[in-house]
């Protein structure tokens, strides 16, 4: 019975995803929320990314931009990973090597998205209202096909021992690249909902500590 488990599983996956297509992004994934403490919010936002296997690689606190990943997406048996939202995404990540890159932008709501991209645009909101934008870019791994002429050659299909279709014995990394697949709106919404939760109950920013006034110095008497 065990030998029939894998074929039955992939048959069920093919039946389930037949006629389905990847979800399309209809517009930007963003929300306007009140953030009383911008610095603490950015810290908690980065924590959400780290806890879900998206390690921040570039963080600009002044501009309010964080780039996390890329992270290789989990397969069907990694049920604890949230990066493959929906049945189509889980089947795609199980049949291909898929990676995702998350970009989170924080800008004042009073500034339009077009103006927020300008270098001199304000980054701190005067009314504590901010626009939180999440973009997740998805890509698929692609490598040159190898010549497979024998059953034993299948063991070396991912090494440089098998020649390519052109008859070249190149390293495995030669010719490999990532094919852009567009945005992942389901994971964008999933991240946005959890990041917005961090804006609830934030402590107000601490007032700057005033330095004690130094006592006036008196001139020494002659």
Image (cartoon, rainbow, N blue to C red):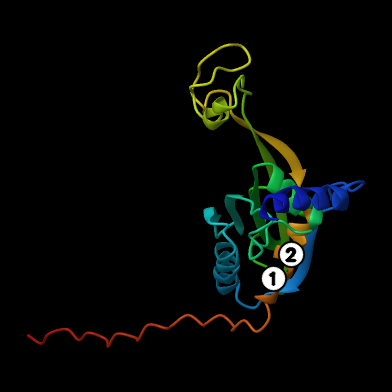
Residue 194 occupies which quadrant of the picture? bottom right
User: Which of the numbered marks, if any, corresponds to residue 190?
Assistant: 2
Which quarter shows the N terminus? bottom right
Residue that carries the numbered disc 1 in the rendered image: 194
Residue 24 in view of the camera? no
Residue 175 occupies which quadrant of the picture? top right
Which quarter shows the C terminus? bottom left
Circle 1: is it few (<14), some (14-19), or many (20+) Cα within 10 Å? few
Q: What residue is shown at x 22% (from left), y 84% (from top)?
A: 217
Residue at the extreme top of the image, as rendered: 167
Question: Considering the numbered disc 2 on the image, is that residue within a helix, a strand or a loop?
Answer: helix
Compared across the picture, whether 174 is left or right of 5 comes to left
Question: Cα distance, mark 2 to mark 1?
Answer: 7 Å
Q: What residue is shown at x 69% (from left), y 61% (from top)?
A: 107
Circle 2: is it few (<14), some (14-19), or many (20+) Cα within 10 Å? some
Give residue 204's position: percent from left, percent from top. 59, 83
Closest to the observer, 172 or 147: 147
Compared across the picture, whether 172 is left or right of 121 comes to left
Q: What residue is shown at x 67% (from left), y 75% (from top)?
A: 35
Closest to the observer, 63 or 136: 136
Query: Is disc 2 in contact with disc 1, using a CB cutoff of under 8 Å?
Result: yes
Give residue 178's position: percent from left, percent from top. 64, 34
Compared across the picture, whether 207 is left or right of 210 comes to right
Residue 98 in view of the camera? yes
């Amino acid at each position: 019975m065990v030998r029939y488990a894998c074929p039955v599983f992939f048959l069920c996956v093919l039946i389930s995803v037949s006629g389905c297509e990847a979800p399309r992004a209809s517009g930007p994934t963003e929300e306007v929320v009140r953030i009383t403490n911008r610095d603490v919010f950015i810290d908690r936002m980065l924590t959400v990314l780290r806890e879900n296997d998206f390690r921040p690689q570039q963080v600009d606190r002044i501009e309010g931009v964080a780039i996390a990943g890329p992270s290789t997406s989990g397969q069907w048996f990694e049920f604890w990973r949230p990066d493959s939202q929906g049945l189509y995404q889980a089947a795609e990540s199980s049949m291909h090597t898929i990676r995702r890159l998350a970009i989170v932008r924080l800008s004042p709501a009073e500034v339009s998205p077009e103006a927020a991209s300008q270098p001199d645009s304000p980054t701190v909101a005067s009314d504590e209202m901010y626009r939180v934008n999440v973009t997740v870019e998805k890509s698929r791994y692609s490598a040159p096909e190898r010549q497979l002429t024998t059953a034993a050659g299948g063991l070396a299909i991912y090494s440089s021992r098998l020649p390519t279709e052109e008859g070249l014995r190149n390293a495995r990394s030669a010719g490999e690249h990532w094919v852009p697949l567009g945005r992942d709106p389901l994971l964008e919404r999933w991240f946005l909902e959890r990041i917005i939760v961090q804006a609830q109950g934030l402590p107000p920013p601490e007032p700057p500590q005033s330095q004690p006034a130094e006592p006036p110095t008196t001139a020494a008497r002659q």
